């Protein structure tokens, strides 16, 4: 789907560069996702419970939800996708600092909370005990 999206951006002349070495002529400084008018999605500032400012993009969140739905993954969000990515890496043996770097979280506690959300497979634990 990303490949098709990038081809469409080239066809629509959105976020391109004259640099012939750039991937598909896409400007590396351009946002990855653009709206139908070729403009970046707007970010909204929202304070969290502690008063810290968080940035959200409802349009992009809706886009992710639609992509997940088309892929047959109902109810998924960008955040649940990030959590699945983190948990999958941990299950196959990658360490927390590397997972943290890949996620780009500012705080290691955030990465640890994501990894703590991994549902434990009781059958697997029991099978290892016997």
Image: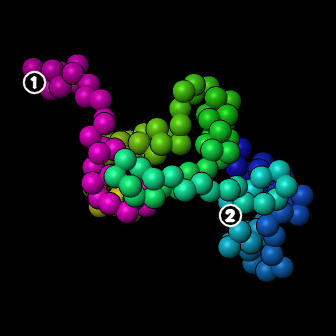
Decide: is 24 above or below 7.
below
Residue drawn 53% across the image and 42% down it:
78
Q: Is residue 119 left or right of residue 54?
A: left
Residue drawn 26% across the image and 25% down it:
121
> In the drawing, what numbered circle is on residue 19?
none
Q: Residue 35: horizontal and vertical position, in percent?
A: 77, 52
Q: Residue 11: horizontal and vertical position, in percent?
A: 90, 58
Q: Is residue 10 left or right of residue 119?
A: right
Q: Main secondary structure of the magenta part?
A: helix
21 and 112: which is toward the camera: 112
Can residue 4 be seen here? The reply is yes
Check disc 1 and report the residue beneath it: 129
Magenta span of residues: 102-130
Q: Residue 68: horizontal and vertical position, in percent?
A: 61, 34
Q: Quadrant of the N terminus?
A: top right
Check disc 2 and report the residue beneath it: 31
Tell me the SS state at disc 2: loop
Return the residue found at the far bottom. Answer: 19
Tell me the SS state at disc 1: helix
Return the residue found at the far left. Answer: 130
Q: Is residue 33 magenta?
A: no
């Amino acid at each position: 789907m990303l490949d098709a999206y990038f081809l469409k951006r080239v066809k629509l002349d959105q976020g391109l560069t004259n640099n012939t070495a750039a991937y598909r002529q896409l400007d590396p400084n351009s946002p990855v996702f653009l709206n139908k008018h070729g403009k970046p999605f707007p970010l909204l500032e929202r304070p969290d419970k502690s008063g810290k400012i968080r940035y959200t993009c409802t349009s992009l969140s809706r886009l992710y939800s639609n992509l997940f739905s088309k892929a047959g993954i109902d109810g998924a969000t960008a955040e649940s996708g990030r959590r699945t990515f983190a948990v999958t890496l941990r299950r196959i043996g990658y360490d927390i600092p590397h997972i943290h770097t890949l996620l780009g979280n500012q705080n290691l506690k955030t990465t640890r909370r994501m990894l703590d959300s991994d549902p434990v497979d009781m059958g697997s634990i029991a099978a290892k005990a016997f």
